[in-house]
Image: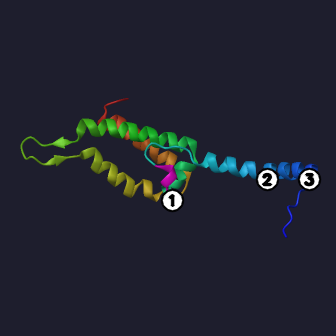
Amino acid sequence: HWRLRVFPKPAMCRTARILAVLLLPAAASTFAAAVPAAGVDCAQARSRIDKLICSDEELSRLDSRLKTVFDEAHGETAGVDGESGRRLDPVGQEQKAWVRQTRAKCGDVACLKRVYAKRIAVIETKWLQRR
């Protein structure tokens, strides 16, 4: 025979309070770490850079802003050369080079924030003629 063991109510309440105090901060930090970013699917983040982007709200906003200005500039510059029929994508090529040569070299959030802010400024100035 098995017997259902019933704990006294005060002990259950105390245990539940202790567990809540211990587990809630960990759960909250887990959800806070999954900051949504426009250019990164944080639920699928695997790379070191993507994880850094998803871990910081300000960097996530910069990532979203970069996606917005890139999409705008890309929409205005990508196309096909009328004479040669060649596909042109100067902003896309520049962005790929930036990802490989600049962004990939950052090892922390502070570095990423600096290079993202600079990249946004370059796209806005060079390709969108702002500022």
Tell me if 110 is positioned left or right of 30 in this view. left
- The local crowd at label 3, few if under 14, some if 14 to 19, many if 20 or more residues have their Cα within 10 Å, is few
Along the line of sight, the residue nearer the viewer: 86 or 107: 86
Check disc 1 and give the amino acid type: Arg
Q: Which mark is residue 48?
A: 1
Residue closer to the observer: 117 or 6: 6
Give the SS element for disc 1.
helix
Place of residue 78 in the rendered image (x, y in percent of width and height, measured from the top left): 22, 41
User: What numbered label is drawn on residue 11?
Assistant: 3
What is the distance, in whole Å, between disc 2 and disc 3 at their CAs?
16 Å
| Furthest residue in direction left, as rendered | 83
How many other residues sit within 10 Å of disc 1, few (<14), some (14-19) or many (≥20)? few
Q: Quadrant of residue 127?
A: top left
In the image, which is nearer the foreground, mark 1 or mark 3? 3
Q: Quadrant of the C terminus?
A: top left
At mark 3, the secondary structure is helix
Q: Residues within 10 Å of mark 2 (few under 14, many from 20)?
A: few
- Residue 117 visible from this viewpoint: no
Magenta stretch: includes residue 107: no
Name the residue that disc number 2 marks: 22
Q: Which residues are magenta?
A: 41-48
Which quadrant of the view contains residue 75?
A: top left
User: 96 and 4: which one is in front?
Assistant: 4
Q: Position of residue 120 (x, y in %)?
A: 41, 40
Residue 108 can be seen in this image: yes
Of the residues under marks 2 and 1, which one precedes in the sequence?
2
Q: Quadrant of the N terminus?
A: bottom right
The kind of residue on which mark 2 rests is: Leu
- At x 68%, y 46%, the residue is 28
